[in-house]
Amino acid sequence: MKLFTRNTAITGNVSRACFRFFTAWADSTCKSLIAENPVCIFAKTRSLESIQVNNLFATLRIQPVPLVVMVDTEPRGEELETSLAKISCQKSLPNIFINGTHVGGLENTLRLYREGKLFDQIKISGAMINKW
């Protein structure tokens, strides 16, 4: 069964309605995950950049632990990824948000880390960094 077939006017209308519903679900899910977590990372399990970002945040020992959403293992991950592209204007993953603000991907996060600004953004978010 093809969900988004547009062979007839009726099927097309149903498909558009389903597409709008799924898009609205993905948009609201992404926005709520970003808003409810001080540090939110959207990534893919087999992406080297995603692994590097996850390792970086693991070494920082942030409390509460950053939320990591592996979109390629989520049942509706493609919809989440599409919504993320709209929200952040960045199509690639990983996609990092701190305190509801889009930080970027691996390069931007590493730049902020090297400049010492990543810690400042994390502290503003209310998350704690354990130094030991």
Image (cartoon, rainbow, N blue to C red):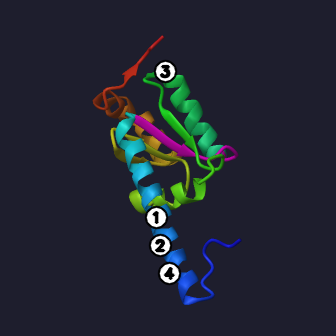
Quarter of the image where the N terminus is located: bottom right
| Residue matched to label 4 | 13
Residue under the point 51% across and 69% down: 18
Furthest-top residue in this view: 132
Q: SS for tag 1?
A: helix
CA separation, marks 2 and 3?
Answer: 43 Å
Tell me how far mark 4 sits from mark 2, CA to CA.
6 Å
> Does 69 sit above or below residue 25?
above
- Crowdedness of circle 4 by 10 Å Cα count: few (<14), some, many (20+)? some
Rendered residue at 54%/48% (across/down): 94
Vertical order, 62 against 98 (above or below):
above
Q: First in sequence: mark 4 or mark 3?
A: 4
Mark 4 and mark 2 in contact? Answer it, CB < 8 Å.
Answer: yes
Q: In the image, what residue type sits under mark 2?
A: Ala
Residue ID for mark 1: 21
Mark 2–mark 3 contact, CB under 8 Å? no
C-alpha distance separating marks 3 and 1:
38 Å
Q: Residues within 10 Å of mark 2 (few under 14, many from 20)?
A: few
Q: Position of residue 22 (x, y in %)?
A: 50, 62
- Marks 4,3: beta carbons within 8 A: no
Read off the magenta span. Answer: 39-47
Task: Answer left or right for 83 relative to 72.
Answer: left
Q: Which residue is labeled 2 in the image? A: 17
- Report helix, strand or loop for mark 4: helix
Check whether the beta carbons of the residues at disc 2 and disc 1 lie within 8 A of each other.
yes
Find residue 71 and name its label: none
